C-alpha cells in the first residue's frame, strides 16, 4: 500500500521528501495507512464526540530566516495562516489558487500524508537514507542481478532484491555524497560505484565517475553536490527508461534529498492582493515542515484572538530544556503583539530536576499551566535516566516502555488534578480568584 502511494505521489511535480517520509516511515511507525481526508473528521467534532483538533506546520523558508517562521494551521474545516487571518476550506489545501481565486482543484491530501507533514521534524538524512535503501528493496525490477562489489556499502546486503543498474547507481551516488568522510572511505565509495557500472565502461556516466574520482578531494561540499547532480543526470540518460515510474520516484526522492525539499504544496495566497506579505504571496509553491522546528508547542494557533483562550494546559514533551517552548512562546508573542502571561525566569532555573507544574497567571492574557514531562514528582532522582530512555529520536517502543511512559505522564495530571480544576473555575468566574 505504501509502495503504491509513493509511486502515485511521485507523478506529481510537487513530490517531496514529505511524501516518502509519510508513506514509508510514518505509515510504518503508526502501523496503519489512513487514506481519509481531514475534512471527514468534521462531524465527530461538531457533535462534541471528539475534542477539536488543531494541527500546525510552518513555512520552511521563513522558519530558516526568522526562527519562528510563518505558521500554518490545519483543522477539519480549514487550512491557512492565522497571523494573516487567511484560510481556505481544508478540502482545497494543495489546490492551485491565483489572486485569491481557485484556479485548479487538486485531490485533497490524505491523513497519512498530513501526519508525515506535521511530524517531519524527525526527518534526518540518516533515517531517510536507511529507510530509502530498505524501501527500494521492496521494488523488484529487472532480471539483472545486483552488480558484484568487494566493498561494504551502507545501503546494500547480498540478500537485497534487484532494483536495476540505475537504482543501484543512484543509491551509490547518494552514498558518496552523504557518507564521504576521509580519503580511505572515499576510495571505497568510488570502488563501489565503479563496480556497479563496470559492465558499462563506455557510458558517459562511467567516464564521469572516473573524472570525479580524480578531483573529489579538492572539491568543497557545494561543488561535490553539483558534480553528483551532473552524474545523476548522466545516469538517467544512460540507463533511464521513459515512463518508468520506479526510476522516476527514485530520482525525484534523491533530488529532494540533495535539496532537502519538504512539504511542497501550491500556495493558496499566491498573488493575493489582500495580503501584504510579499515573501509569501510571491511564491507559487511553499514548503511546509513540522512546526516543532520553530516552537515545539503550537501556542501561535491557540492564541488566535478569535479563540479567546483563557486557560492553556501545556504538557511539554520536548527534549532538553523543559521550559524552552514556553520561553519561545513568550518571545513570539512579544514580537507579534499577542497577549501572554509574564514568565518569571527565576522560576525556570532548575531544568535538570523541574517540578511537575508551573502556573503563570494571565493579566489580560490566558493563564498557562506548564507540565514538564519528567520531573521530581513522577521520576524522582531519575529525570536524566527517563530523558535518555525516551529520547526524541527513539522510533519504537516495547509494551513495557509504553506503559512506563504513560504511567509517568498520567501522574502529572493526577497529582495536579485539583490545581487544574481550580484554574478552570478561576477563568470561568474571575471574581472567585479575588475571593
Image (tube, rainbow, N blue to C red):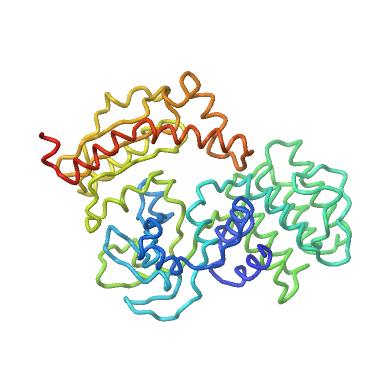
Q: Residue at x 38, y 53 (%)?
A: 62
Relative to 229, does residue 215 appear above or below in the rendering? above
Extreme residue toward the top, this view = 381
Image spot of residue 373 (x, y percent): 43, 33
Q: Quadrant where the C terminus lies?
A: top left
Q: How many marks?
A: 0
Image spot of residue 88 (x, y percent): 35, 70
Q: Quadrant where the N terminus lies?
A: bottom right
Q: Residue at x 44, y 54 (%)?
A: 60
Image spot of residue 324 (x, y percent): 37, 35
The reply, left or right, for residue 361 in relation to residue 269 is: left
Image spot of residue 432 (x, y percent): 13, 38
Q: Quadrant of residue 139?
A: bottom right
Q: Nearer the viewer, residue 222 or 161?
A: 161
Relative to 285, does residue 429 appear above or below in the rendering? above
The reply, left or right, for residue 86 in relation to residue 29 is: left
Q: Residue at x 59, y 53 (%)?
A: 26
Relative to 224, does residue 370 appear above or below in the rendering? above
Extreme residue toward the bottom, this view = 103
Q: Nearer the viewer, residue 21 or 276?
A: 21
Q: Nearer the viewer, residue 301 or 76?
A: 76
The reply, left or right, for residue 126 in relation to residue 415 is: right
Amino acid at each position: 500500500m505504501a509502495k503504491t502511494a509513493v509511486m502515485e505521489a511521485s507523478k506529481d511535480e510537487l513530490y517531496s521528501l514529505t511524501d516518502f517520509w509519510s508513506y514509508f516511515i510514518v505509515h510504518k511507525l503508526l502501523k496503519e495507512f489512513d487514506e481519509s481526508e481531514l475534512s471527514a473528521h468534521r462531524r465527530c467534532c461538531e457533535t462534541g464526540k471528539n475534542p477539536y483538533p488543531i494541527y500546525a506546520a510552518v513555512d520552511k523558508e521563513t522558519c530558516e530566516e526568522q526562527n519562528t517562521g510563518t505558521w500554518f494551521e490545519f483543522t477539519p474545516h480549514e487550512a491557512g495562516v492565522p497571523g494573516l487571518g487567511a484560510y481556505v476550506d481544508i478540502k482545497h489545501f494543495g489546490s492551485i489558487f491565483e489572486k485569491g481565486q481557485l484556479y485548479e482543484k487538486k485531490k485533497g491530501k490524505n491523513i497519512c500524508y498530513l501526519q508525515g507533514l506535521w511530524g517531519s521534524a524527525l526527518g534526518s538524512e540518516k533515517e531517510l537514507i536507511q529507510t530509502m535503501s530498505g524501501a527500494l528493496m521492496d521494488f523488484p525490477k529487472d532480471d539483472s542481478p545486483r552488480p558484484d562489489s568487494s566493498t561494504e556499502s551502507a545501503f546494500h546486503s547480498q540478500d537485497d532484491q534487484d532494483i536495476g543498474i540505475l537504482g543501484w547507481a543512484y543509491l551509490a551516488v547518494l552514498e558518496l555524497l552523504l557518507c564521504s568522510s576521509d580519503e580511505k572511505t572515499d576510495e571505497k565509495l568510488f570502488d563501489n560505484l565503479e563496480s556497479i557500472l563496470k559492465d558499462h565502461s563506455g557510458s558517459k556516466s562511467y567516464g564521469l565517475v572516473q573524472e570525479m574520482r580524480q578531483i573529489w578531494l579538492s572539491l568543497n561540499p557545494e561543488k561535490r553536490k553539483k558534480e553528483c547532480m551532473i552524474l545523476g543526470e548522466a545516469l538517467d540518460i544512460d540507463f533511464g527508461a521513459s515512463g518508468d515510474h520506479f526510476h522516476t520516484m527514485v530520482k525525484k526522492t534523491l533530488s529532494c534529498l540533495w535539496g532537502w525539499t519538504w512539504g511542497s504544496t501550491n500556495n493558496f495566497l499566491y498573488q493575493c492582493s489582500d495580503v501584504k506579505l510579499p515573501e509569501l504571496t510571491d511564491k507559487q509553491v511553499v514548503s511546509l515542515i513540522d512546526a516543532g522546528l520553530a516552537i515545539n508547542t503550537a501556542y501561535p494557533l491557540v492564541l488566535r484572538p478569535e479563540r479567546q483562550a483563557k486557560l492553556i494546559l501545556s504538557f511539554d514533551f520536548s527534549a532538553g530544556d523543559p521550559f524552552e517552548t514556553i520561553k519561545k512562546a513568550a518571545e513570539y508573542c512579544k514580537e507579534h503583539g499577542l497577549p501572554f502571561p509574564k514568565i518569571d525566569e527565576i522560576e525556570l532555573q532548575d531544568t535538570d530536576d523541574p517540578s511537575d507544574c508551573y502556573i503563570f497567571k494571565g493579566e489580560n492574557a490566558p493563564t498557562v499551566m506548564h507540565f514538564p514531562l519528567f520531573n521530581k514528582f513522577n521520576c524522582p532522582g531519575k529525570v536524566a535516566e527517563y530523558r535518555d530512555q525516551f529520547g526524541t529520536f527513539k522510533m519504537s517502543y516495547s509494551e513495557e516502555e509504553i506503559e512506563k511512559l504513560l504511567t509517568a505522564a498520567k501522574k502529572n495530571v493526577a497529582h495536579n488534578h485539583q490545581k487544574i480544576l481550580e484554574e478552570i473555575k478561576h477563568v470561568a468566574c474571575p471574581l472567585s480568584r479575588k475571593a
